[in-house]
């Protein structure tokens, strides 16, 4: 099976597009290629089916006295049927193969990627940087006597929710696992999703070129507060990131909201990542 | 002159006692239909509740655990009771009539199957008791579903029993339907001149026979893990949570064809009847159905593209997944070709069937990218997926089921439904559904994750969620109109002729409603019998 796929890969690579470097994020730029191809093909196919259908629906209406029964002899045509077997077959084989080529690129982290260990727990993530620095992003939960307003629930309070700093233009290899149930790691601007499975290590890689604030969401249902399991990425230029990593800047705008105070004692996420 | 025999009470005016102990396929079919529709409404109401909560970001009316419970019931009930269950209703009622038999092959097994389904319904209702809610989602992935205390998954046992009981009913039904079609056809009705609906039902039930054991095993292990401390899926003790996903989707992907193949069958029946023309490419239609059923068993890991399985498996199943688009395309093109040189009558069932075709095309076209890992990686478990399966299930399957209701209503009840109200219901449903489901596709491309009770206050997201909620209420109003039309027809409709649509198919040669034993003597079928022809009599 694998050699067959290998052969297809060689075919595939020959028409895989090369992405420009000045793009918002990767693999989103690769995804964009297949997205646009799919969109165009779909619109064309929809038109090819819907326009004749609507035309026939209008033209071949039942008309008393004039057209009361359809053409009883018109029961099939092997040429036409072969046509709409073979053309779709070619289209889907092309789509699958082009997708294959792109996917190979999406899954292969560059050599110089920075490794970020991420451990999920119900409900939040712990991020661990190469030098051991840790950041926790934990869901803000409503309690019986207190509900947060939408801006608060999805804001950065600096105690449980901290900015996850990421250097711009540097490929990141996120090494993922979970310490309880299955969660998922979705970096919105990069368009990459990967489940975080207890007992397994999975990975995803991405690179965001434009500094700014971005969302990370959990995309695998993980219970009560699944919908508030998010993190905020703060993508900053490399120099600024290095300073932050060394602890020369406070990690959030909030006073005294150092990640070390982030409730680490009773957070089980600690136990898993060594 | 069957009306002249007064001893024939219409078969549906029976006492409660007769209903409970009946083994008549028509009565059992009706019972399936009523149960399915009631649960369809329940699941729809819960969806409206979810849509209300999502109207604005932040906590509105319900708690997250309530949302999760609504969503679990909405998903499980609408799939098992409606998208699968409703076809058991059609199959029961129609198979013997279409092949000229007096009943199904195993009438008592059939009744047992229905009562298992009923027992599952009781369990589903038990989950409404506070403290018994299930919050596992219809997929019930461990370790969430198998671990108490983390994540609030609710009473997993009820989730497991629902699968066991509906699974039992499915297998009983499958054995019965397959045997009936294979061995009880009248001479003259062969595999290549029987109703396409029968092909759809048979293929669906072969899938049930082969697939249900797999999911039954998965949920049984889930039960053992949860309550008896086994560790099939417990990673701390060497188990593997991804194993569950494999076993689950090995059935639950083919299960989507259990839902959609009978729908294809209904569309073929309705389109050929109202186009007054044989279906175009009968043989390729039948072969396509079986091809879909076969290849459908080789694609399950497309639900697991981000679960941490090896990349080469993803690519392999990406090819098989996209291959399914080919037979599916054949069906759509053949339906369109059937309209060529037709004499189309726009009655309510035809509107529903044509709507189902054009909406299914959107469902299919949005399914293709989900089978391409390079695309899926960005939209997996997003609202794009939600939009995709609502186009397939919420539109194609549901519109076909309504097409079938309106189409066979004269045969089942002996009364005509009100045409104007029926047509109106179609247009309202079409507008509401597209508003709701198309926006799900858009917001999914933007990144909105699936199964979210709350979402961040991003302006464009809020607008899109509000539009969806309006769409949901328009859709619900349309469904209400359709149900009113059907009930009104059954109560006070005009008397239906035996064959109001001039179909050539065998069930229309019986009186409406059919007498208790269907055919007094085995019906003679002409040599060139073709159920999709225009009636020459
Ligand atoms: C009144 C009409 C309907 C509305 C308003 C509606 C709305 C919804 C909503 C809001 C969700 C949850 C999305 C999320 O949070 O992830 C959902 C999920 C779902 N719906 Fe519907 N829906 C409707 C009809 C249907 C129909 C007719 C079907 C199938 C025949 C269907 C099948 C499903 C399934 C399978 C799920 C996934 C459940 C899960 O994620 O576990 N829905 N629907
Ligand atoms: Cu989650
Ligand atoms: Cu699937």
Image: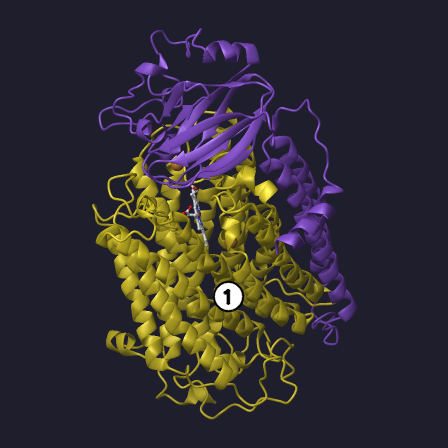
Residue A193: give x, y in percent of width and height: 51, 36
**Image point (42%, 56%), residue name:** B248
**Image point (47%, 32%), residue name:** A175
Per the image, label 1 sits on a secondary structure element best described as: helix
Q: In the image, is residue B252 above or below residue A205?
A: below
Residue B32: give x, y in percent of width and height: 37, 67
Q: Which residue is mark 1?
A: B404
Left or right: where B64 falls relative to B365: left
Residue B368: give x, y in percent of width and height: 61, 49
Q: Quadrant of the C terminus of chain A?
A: top left
Give the quarter of the image for residue A17.
top right
Chain letter, colour yellow in render = B
Q: Residues within 10 Å of mark 1 (few under 14, many from 20)?
A: many
User: To which chain does the residue with label 1 belong?
Assistant: B
**Image point (56%, 14%), residue name:** A238
Image coloring type = by chain
Q: Closest to the observer: A151 or B475?
A: A151
Chain letter, colour purple in render = A
Give the quarter of the image for residue B48.
top left
Q: Is residue A73 visible from the viewing direction of this image? A: yes
Q: Quadrant of the N terminus of chain A?
A: bottom right
Q: Closest to the observer: A195 or B45?
A: A195
Q: Is residue B485 visible from the viewing direction of this image? A: no
């Amino acid at each position: 099976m694998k050699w067959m796929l290998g052969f297809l890969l060689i075919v595939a690579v020959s028409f895989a597009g090369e992405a420009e470097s000045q793009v918002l994020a990767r693999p989103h730029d690769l995804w964009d290629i297949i997205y646009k191809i799919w969109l165009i093909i779909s619109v064309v196919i929809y038109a090819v089916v819907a326009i004749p259908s609507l035309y026939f629906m209008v033209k071949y209406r039942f008309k008393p006295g004039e057209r009361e029964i359809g053409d009883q002899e018109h029961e099939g045509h092997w040429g036409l049927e072969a046509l709409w077997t073979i053309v779709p077959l070619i289209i889907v084989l092309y789509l699958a193969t082009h997708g294959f080529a792109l996917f190979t690129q999406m899954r292969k982290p560059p050599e110089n990627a920075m490794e970020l260990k991420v451990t999920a727990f119900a409900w939040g993530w712990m991020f661990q940087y190469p030098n051991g620095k840790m950041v926790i992003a934990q869901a803000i939960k409503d309690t019986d006597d207190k509900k947060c307003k939408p801006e608060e629930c999805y804001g950065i309070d600096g105690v449980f929710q901290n900015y996850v700093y990421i250097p711009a233009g540097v490929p990141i290899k996120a090494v993922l696992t979970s310490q309880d149930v299955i969660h998922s790691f979705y970096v919105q601007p990069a368009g990459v999703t990967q489940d975080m499975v207890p007992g397994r290590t999975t990975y995803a890689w991405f690179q965001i070129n434009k500094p700014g604030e971005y969302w990370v969401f959990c995309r695998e249902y993980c219970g009560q507060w699944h919908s508030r399991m998010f993190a905020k990425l703060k993508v900053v230029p490399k120099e600024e990131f290095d300073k932050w990593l060394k602890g020369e800047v406070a990690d959030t705008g909030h006073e005294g909201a150092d990640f070390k105070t982030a409730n680490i004692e009773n957070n089980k996420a600690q136990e898993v990542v060594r | 002159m069957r009306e002249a025999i007064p001893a024939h009470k219409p078969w549906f005016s029976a006492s409660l006692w007769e209903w409970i102990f009946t083994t008549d396929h028509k009565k059992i079919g009706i019972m399936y239909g009523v149960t399915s529709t009631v649960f369809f409404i329940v699941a729809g109401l819960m969806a409206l509740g979810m849509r209300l909560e999502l109207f604005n970001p932040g906590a509105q009316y319900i708690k997250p655990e309530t949302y999760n419970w609504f969503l679990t019931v909405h998903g499980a009930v609408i799939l098992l009771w409606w998208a699968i269950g409703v076809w058991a209703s059609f199959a029961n009622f129609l198979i013997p009539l279409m092949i000229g038999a007096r009943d199904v092959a195993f009438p008592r097994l059939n009744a047992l199957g229905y009562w298992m389904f009923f027992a599952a319904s009781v369990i589903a209702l038990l989950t409404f008791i506070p403290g018994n809610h299930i919050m596992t989602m219809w997929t019930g992935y461990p370790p969430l579903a198998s671990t108490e205390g983390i994540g609030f998954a609710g009473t997993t046992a009820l989730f497991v029993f629902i699968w066991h009981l509906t699974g039992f009913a499915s297998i009983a039904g499958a054995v019965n339907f397959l045997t009936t079609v294979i061995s009880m056809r009248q001479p003259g009705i062969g595999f290549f001149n029987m109703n396409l609906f029968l092909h759809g039902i048979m293929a669906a039930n072969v899938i049930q026979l082969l697939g249900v054991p797999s999911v039954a095993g998965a949920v049984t292990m889930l039960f053992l893990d949860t309550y008896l401390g086994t560790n099939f899926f417990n990673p701390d003790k060497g188990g593997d949570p991804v194993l569950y996903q494999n076993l689950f989707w090995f059935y639950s992907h083919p299960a989507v064809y259990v839902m959609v193949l009978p729908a294809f069958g209904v569309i073929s029946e309705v389109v050929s009847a109202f186009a007054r023309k044989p279906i175009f490419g009968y043989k390729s239609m039948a072969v396509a159905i079986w091809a879909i059923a076969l290849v459908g068993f080789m694609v399950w890991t497309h639900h697991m593209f981000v679960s941490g399985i090896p990349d080469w498996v993803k690519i392999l199943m990406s090819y098989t997944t996209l291959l399914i688009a080919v037979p599916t395309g054949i069906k759509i093109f053949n339906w369109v070709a059937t309209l060529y040189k037709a004499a189309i009558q726009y009655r309510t069932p035809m509107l529903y069937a044509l709507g189902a075709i054009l909406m299914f095309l959107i469902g299919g076209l949005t399914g293709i990218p989900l089978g391409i890992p390079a695309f899926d990686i960005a939209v997996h478990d997003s609202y794009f997926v939600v939009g995709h399966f609502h186009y397939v299930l919420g539109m194609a399957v549901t519109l076909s089921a309504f097409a079938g209701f309106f189409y066979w209503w004269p045969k089942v009840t002996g009364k005509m439904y009100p045409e104007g109200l029926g047509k109106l219901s179609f247009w309202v449903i079409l507008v509401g559904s597209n508003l709701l489901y198309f926006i799900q596709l858009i917001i999914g491309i933007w990144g909105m994750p699936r199964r979210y009770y709350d979402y961040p206050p991003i302006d464009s997201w809020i607008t899109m969620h509000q539009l969806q909620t309006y769409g949901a209420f328009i859709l619900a109003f349309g469904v209400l109109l359709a149900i009113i039309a059907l009930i009104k027809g059954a109560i006070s409709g005009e008397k239906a002729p035996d064959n109001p649509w001039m179909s050539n198919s065998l069930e229309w040669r019986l009186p409406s409603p059919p007498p208790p034993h269907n055919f007094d003597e085995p019906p003679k079928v002409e040599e060139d019998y073709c159920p999709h022809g225009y009636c020459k009599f």
